[in-house]
Image: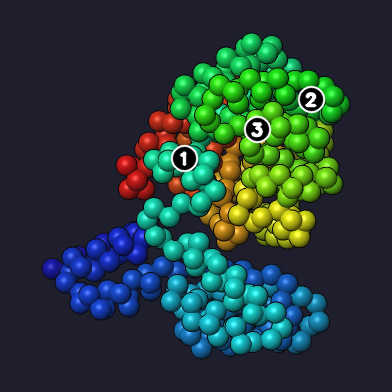
Amino acid sequence: MAALREIITSSQEELAREFASIEVDKGGIGIMSPKGFFHVLRLRSLKSPAANILKQEMLSVGGECATSKMVILGDPEPQDAIIMGTRRQLAKLATKLKAQPFGLKRAAGQIEAFLNQNSHESGAIDPLLLSLAGDRSRYPLIMGILNVTPDSFSDGNDYLDKKKAIAHGEAMADQQADMIDVGGESTRPDSDPISEEEELRRVIPIIAALSSELSRPISIDTMKAKVASEALQAGATVVNDVSAGRHDPEMLDLAAQAGCPIVMMHMQGQPKTMQRNPHYDHLMDELHAFFDERLTVAVKTGVKEEHIIIDPGIGFGKRRGDNYEILRRLRELRVFGRPLLVGTSRKSFLQNSLGETPRDRIEESVAAGTIAMVNGADILRVHDIIPAQKSKVIYQRLAGMA
């Protein structure tokens, strides 16, 4: 009697094993494995002639392409298109588009970059992540949060004292945090900015002390170029800017000159006002447009693309449902080919009951962090190192890494 089961695989290697189990010819396995992975891609801001050509070329390789009816009418306004096909069809499409006008050669390059980034090759880890981790076994990375502030939403005033801050940084390193992220200015909702001088006073002694004691990379969580500059001189090696270089026009110049990794985060509004009625017409498309613009500006400024890490900004100008949608669709941001940092730790969108404090959300934070790793996060920014490390081990086993 015939019986049916769905085959769920995450790599061509796994699918090849399924083919081999029913004794498919080796040549056939090589041909058919790429056909087992189907992708839906959205191309933004195409001229109508380009969208028409894209549709015809995608149909010619056996895929599908959806466009607005305005494309057929030759509307001069830029139009979006959604293409649907297997990896093999998309590769053929990219080859065909290289010979086409209207900016389609650039689209071909983007499709090829997407296919390379999502090649399902086991063990493929971005060189920047390897340089930060120092060891493949440490991937994904766990970034420990060290807030040297009186008003952070979860641990404000806990580590404002220098000795306590240093001791906590050392403790996180002992707990196997892969990075330590030091911040002196709270960016929680409704927080007030502080002066450059005060921020420097808070963070520089801590960074100097930890960098002399620890072998872990230290990042400086700041929107100010001068603070970042002095932090790098004190021993930090990564800049983590929640404004993605928009707050201080000198930040990207600094990152370019220093040649250091920089985290660029999405935030709608400013920390003071970001949670006052945030709104998106199309969340993931707006995030994509934001990172497309920010990466273009950063590279033009002189920042090496291979030094950029992107962060979708969970909780920064997002409604509760927005945060869950980002977690669910996080892998869409891998189209940029850059490592993804995600911070869900103890945040209010995880709240389950009235009266609970951020410290009560450890289990929820672990669950959200694990989901983030499964959906493509390369770095988790967390308060609680040991639970995060335990969840990382489960992820590594799930991914066949341990």
Q: Residue 384: horizontal and vertical position, in percent?
A: 52, 25
Question: Are there few (<14), some (14-19), or many (20+) residues within 10 Å of tag 1?
Answer: some
- The amino acid beneath tag 2 is Glu
Q: Earlier in the sequence, mark 2 or mark 3?
A: 2
> Is there any visible trace of residue 54 in the rendered image?
yes
In the picture provided, is 246 more to the left or to the right than 21? Answer: right
Question: Residue shown at 52%/23% (left/top)?
Answer: 172
Nearer to me, 262 or 397: 262
The residue positioned 42% from the left and 40% from the top of the image is: 135
User: Which of the two residues, 97 or 196, is positioned nearer the viewer here?
Assistant: 196
Q: Nearer the viewer, residue 370 or 196?
A: 196
Q: Residues within 10 Å of mark 2 (few under 14, many from 20)?
A: some
The numbered mark at residue 67 is: none
Q: Of callouts 1 and 3, which one flags the residue occurring earlier in the amino acid sequence? A: 1
Q: Which residue is mark 2?
A: 199
Residue 277 in view in this figure: no
Q: Is residue 107 left or right of residue 286?
A: left
Closer to the chain start, of discs 2 and 1, is 1
Given the image, on which type of amino acid does mark 3 rest?
A: Ala
Relative to 184, is 375 above or below? below
* Residue type at numbered disc 1: Gly
| Other-residue count near label 3 (Cα within 10 Å), few / some / many at <14 / 14–19 / ≥20 | many
| Quadrant of the image occupied by residue 394 | top left
Toward the left, the furthest residue is: 1
The residue tagged 3 is 236
